[in-house]
Image (cartoon, helix red, strand yellow):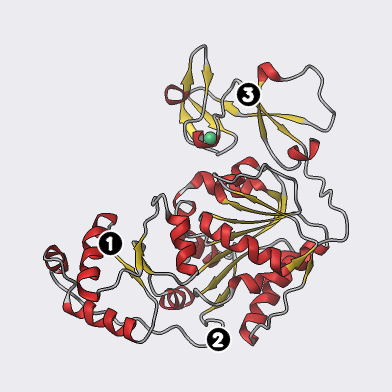
Amino acid sequence: MIEDYFGRRILVPIVDMPKTLPAKIKVLPTMKVAKSTIICQRCGARISLSAAALPNHEFYCPICLNLGRVDTLSKFYHVAEPNQFCPPYPQLIWQGQLSLLQEQVAKEVQVSMCHHERRLIWAVTGAGKTEMMFKGLAERLQQGERIAWASPRVDVCLEIYPRLKKAFKNCEIALLYGKAQEPYHYRQLTVCTTHQLLRFYHAFDNLIIDEVDAFPFATNPQLYFAAQNAVKPDGGMTFLTATPGKALLQSVKRGQLQVSYLPLRYHGHLLPVPRVELTLNWRLQLQKGHLPPKVRQTLQHELATGQRFLLFVPHVKDLPAVKLALHNDLETMDFATVYASDPKRLEKVQAMRDQKYFFWLRRQFWNAALRFQKLMS
Ligand SMILES: [Zn+2]
């Protein structure tokens, strides 16, 4: 199907390439080979010849190997994105109400996406970031644009997909992630992990990156390169996050990135200010099978008032000891432990959403509001 190549770069071994191809299909190189390095055209990595060497003076990219080997024995097939979508275009049927502040951000998003600008939406968790995107997204889809909603986290993709399906009428969405069962289909709207962006080339008129500061996107220049390539040269990008990192904030300071800031949750209340309490020797107490008294009292209070909560620990290896101590001190097993490479992570996250658990993770967080003030001062 020729549609499979629209805005994509599909690897084809040179030996399998027919002598004549349909005129629309362009054949693009996979590697640039220089004197001492090669540059992978898929992920942008620059690698020394010795690290990339295959027999017979051929080369491959070890950096993006997990998406299938890019090497000098292959080429990319690519067809320029034609935006071949037919009316009726997807229509927003979401009936929810936005608060005044949300409305203001939604308006900024709408203008930004219309002009294909780059904008950071910095909003606390629970501020309703997704709903603030709806109007801008709907308007662009009505204009026949191709759009991707990408996230470094597969669980974000799995959560956003049904919400978008519900919010829009006449909207078929491609959902792409590493373990996805469905084959690829050409769609006006794509929800995918940021890794999948490596397969696109100048495809999207607007690209939204949700939780842009999550691992691995924030620490992986190849994924950033992929995002830049996935969007059309004149396309727009919108970054969503509660905790923007240094690079994004520097882009804001330099005026390369517009910013919308929302410190309020959807019900209009400010986030509670965290209170710091120091507990010394907590690992020692855990070794005896118990939580530190302060932690125990806090958690007992949360449970007594029916509050669900997340408990963060510094390392994955702390999880078994904390689990045992929780069991001993709180006499409940209605919780689960989870960590980034937990094979049952997706099931556990869903169980938490279904209110079957409270559970803990190992990530850290910090006070976004203080950092915003610092940036703007
Ligand atoms: Zn590569």
Rendered image quadrant of residue 98: bottom right
Q: What mark, if any, has residue 314 been given in the picture?
A: 1
Q: Earlier in the sequence, mark 2 or mark 3?
A: 3
Q: Is mark 2 within 8 Å of ligand 1?
A: no
Q: Amino acid at mark 3?
A: Ser
Q: Is residue 292 above or below residue 185?
A: below
Secondary structure under tag 2 reads: loop
Label drawn at residue 112: none
Binning the other alpha carbons within 10 Å of mark 2 as few (below 14), some (14 to 19) or many (20 upward) gives few
Q: Amino acid at mark 1?
A: Pro
282, 119: nearer the viewer: 282
- Could you tell me the amino acid type at mark 2? His
Residue 110 visible within the image: no
**Placement of 109 over or under 74, stated as above or below:** below
In the image, residue 229 lies at what x, y percent? 64, 45
Measure how far apart labels 2 and 3 are at the Cα level: 54 Å
* Disc number lying in front (2 or 3): 2
| Residue 1 horizontal side relative to residue 348, left or right | right
Find residue 97 and report its horizontal and vertical position in percent. 68, 83
307 relative position to 114: left or right: left
Residue located at (48% from left, 59% from top): 247
> Spatial distance from mark 1 to mark 3, Cα to Cα?
44 Å
Asked if the beta carbon under badge 1 is closer than 8 A to the nearest atom of ligand 1, the reply is no
Q: Which mark is residue 74?
A: 3
Comparing 243 with 158, the one in front is 158
Q: Spatial distance from mark 2 to mark 1, Cα to Cα?
A: 31 Å
Residue 267, disc: 2
Residue at x-position 40% and y-position 54%: 340
Left or right relative to 43: residue 375 = left
